[in-house]
Amino acid sequence: MDRRTLLAGGGTLLVAATLARDAHARFKAAELTHEDSHFMQLAIDQAKEADYPFGAVIIEGARVLALGRNSSKRNADPTAHAEMVAIRAFLSGHEPQDFKHTTLYSSGEPCPMCMGAIIWCGIRRLVYAASIAELATKIGQINITSQQMADATPFADMEIAGGLLSGNAMQLFDKG
């Protein structure tokens, strides 16, 4: 039986089930450290200056390597989310393979676009403040979490922690 016959004959579910069974999520819950609060506050500080209150920081060890804030209005670029701006800033001075030892801090849980970029960059650790569910109470969100994205990515290892200083990040939405 060829592929077209298999898929046309209802084999789609069989193929999907096989792929899902063979996919092993490589998401791991990240342990939070005292330093994480410091770097998350830097991301929140970036959010205070953003078009929409989202900020991001990329670090390696204790060194800040890139900062980003949502610039979608001022840049007339709907992809200029804080994480994307930080990734672009990182790449202006580093090679793509340098992502593999970094942590990205975000004042809000990354949207699917940003999370896809984080995964493709090979960033090994993500720490975010406000969750998608929290953010959805203030601003439109695509309701796909970072963990769901990571769980659907069997080729990448990633640690994720959320909720760090989320109250501080959410307060920025109340400052008009």
Image (cartoon, helix red, strand yellow):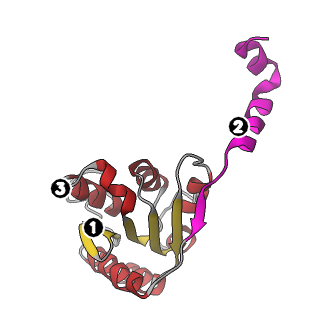
The quadrant in which residue 36 appears is bottom left
Taking the magenta stretch, the answer to whether it contains residue 77 is no
Q: Residue 134's quadrant in the figure?
A: bottom right
The tag on residue 19 is 2
The residue lying at 35 percent from left, 61 percent from top is: 83
Q: Residues within 10 Å of mark 2 (few under 14, many from 20)?
A: few
Disc 3 marks a residue whose amino acid type is Gly
Give me the C-alpha separation between circle 1 and circle 3.
Answer: 24 Å
Label 1 belongs to which residue? 51
Task: Quickly name the residue at label 3.
Answer: 93
Mark 1 or 3 closer to N-term? 1
The quarter of the picture where the N terminus appears is top right
Residue 150 horizontal/vertical position (percent) = 56, 55
Q: Of marks 3 and 2, which one's residue comes earlier in the chain?
A: 2
Q: Is residue 114 visible?
A: yes
Percent of width and height locating residue 52: 33, 68
In the picture, measured across the screen, residue 124 lies left or right of residue 19, that is left
Q: Nearer the viewer, mark 2 or mark 1?
A: 2
Q: Which portion, as a residue range, is magenta? A: 1-29
The span from disc 3 to disc 2 (Cα, nearest Å) is: 38 Å
Q: Nearer the viewer, residue 165 or 66?
A: 66
Report the amino acid beneath label 1.
Asp
Q: Secondary structure at mark 2?
A: helix
Q: Where residue 107 appears, x then y in whole percent? A: 40, 74
Q: Disc 2 versus disc 1: distance between alpha carbons?
A: 40 Å
Q: Specify whether residue 13 is painted magenta.
A: yes
Q: Is residue 9 left or right of residue 126?
A: right
| Vertical arrangement, residue 113 with respect to residue 101, above or below | above
Q: Secondary structure at mark 1?
A: loop
Write the residue at 25% across / 61% down: 71
Main SS, magenta region, reads helix
Q: Residues within 10 Å of mark 1 (few under 14, many from 20)?
A: some
